[in-house]
Amino acid sequence: MKNKLFPIVIMLMVLIAWSCGSPKTTEPAKSANIETMSETATDFAALVGQWCDAHNTKDVGALSNAYNQSVMFYGSPMDKNECIENKLAFFKKKPDFKQEVTGEVIVENISDTEVKCSFVKRVTVGGQTTDYPSYLHFRKVGDFWKISVESDLVTDENLAKRAETKNLTQEMGERYDVSGTYDFNGDGKKESCYLLEPKKYNDEDHFMECEGECNCLIMFSDSNIPPIEVETCIGGKPKIYGDLDGNGTIEIGIWPWWWTSCWHTFYIYTLVNGEWEYFVDPFSVHCNLMEALEESGEPIITPVKGQKDMFQINYSYFDDEEGIMEGIKTVKKL
């Protein structure tokens, strides 16, 4: 849970760096066919070109096909839908940008299921042209290769510097108290909890930035219970679900707030041997669904009757034709 979120200014810089075009070493297929590349004839230079074309044409369907469900996006873990929505917001803000890949796409086999492609992106925005040494990781999902990592060496260097200078005693901001008391650790005693927001700058020069990491902390009245650090979070309301699996401890969830995007990842935590772990795999939830659940009072997760460690969750997904959709699926406790 200790991935470090870089400031939003780096994110904006990275978004401006979304530059890619068809690599000179190969002629990419049309972006609409990005999912047709199977392991029997994988041309990774062409996949990079298709990814680039999808940005130039703002093809949401092609972008959706290109990415894995979870993406390490310039050092920050994101759900695919959140990643794409951020890209679309950037396209709207910078309608004049264009992109190309210059030189060769260098392909490195990391494992049988992961490949790294390195290349130079040439970005032109507002009359300014900049080259960025960039890379994508493709992960094999079934018969297809999906983007699991997107970044560049400039961002990596900035993240490394930030990690070296991180203020471990950063001041936290506003506090949100959760009503009620609960036996979170199963010791027979009830505890309260509250959320601490990161302290945010309040001036135009540091718009959408935090004084330190933009992470929230869920704290507990019992100091023996470790805090939960929620990454990419500037606020939220922790949800208490009780003892979902009957093991004597209380599960807690949160939908992190952020400055932009209505797509966020929902997290549900459980205490195991004194450490907080995911109760089920994190899943994507749009603000439309959150508002509907708040209005109806329906929980986002419920046990499946008669099936041990199986749960139904409400989640959001994006359909190329229908747009933002809501669904229910059964998942297994981790």
Image (cartoon, rainbow, N blue to C red):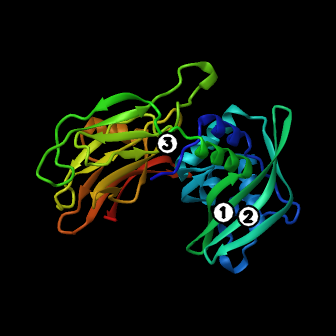
The answer to whether mark 1 and mark 3 are in CB contact below 8 A is no
User: Marks 1 and 2, Cα distance to the nearest angstrom?
Assistant: 6 Å
Circle 3 crowding by C-alpha within 10 Å: few under 14, some 14–19, many from 20: many
Percent position of residue 90, x then y: 66, 37
With respect to residue 279, does 57 lie above or below? above
Residue at 69% x, 63% y is 33
User: Marks 1 and 3, Cα distance to the nearest angstrom?
Assistant: 22 Å
- Can you name the residue that lies furthest to the left here? 188
| Image quadrant assignment for residue 216 | top left
Counting residues from the start of the chain, the first of labels 3 and 2 encountered is 2
Tell me the residue that label 2 is attached to.
117
Tell me the residue that label 3 is attached to.
232
Q: Amino acid at mark 3?
A: Thr
| Image quadrant assignment for residue 25 | bottom right
**In terms of secondary structure, where does tag 2 sit?**
strand
Residue at 32% x, 56% y is 275
Q: Is residue 62 visible?
A: no
Residue at 51% x, 32% y is 259
**In terms of secondary structure, where does tag 1 sit?**
strand
Counting residues from the start of the chain, the first of labels 1 and 3 encountered is 1
Circle 2 crowding by C-alpha within 10 Å: few under 14, some 14–19, many from 20: many
Tell me the residue that label 1 is attached to.
137
Q: Amino acid at mark 2?
A: Cys
Percent position of residue 145, x then y: 63, 68
User: Marks 3 and 2, Cα distance to the nearest angstrom?
Assistant: 27 Å
| Image quadrant assignment for residue 238 | top left
Residue at 63% x, 49% y is 74
Percent position of residue 255, x then y: 39, 42
Percent position of residue 158, x then y: 67, 44
Q: Amino acid at mark 1?
A: His
Q: Which residue is more in the foreground, 93 or 327?
A: 93
The answer to whether mark 1 and mark 2 are in CB contact below 8 A is yes
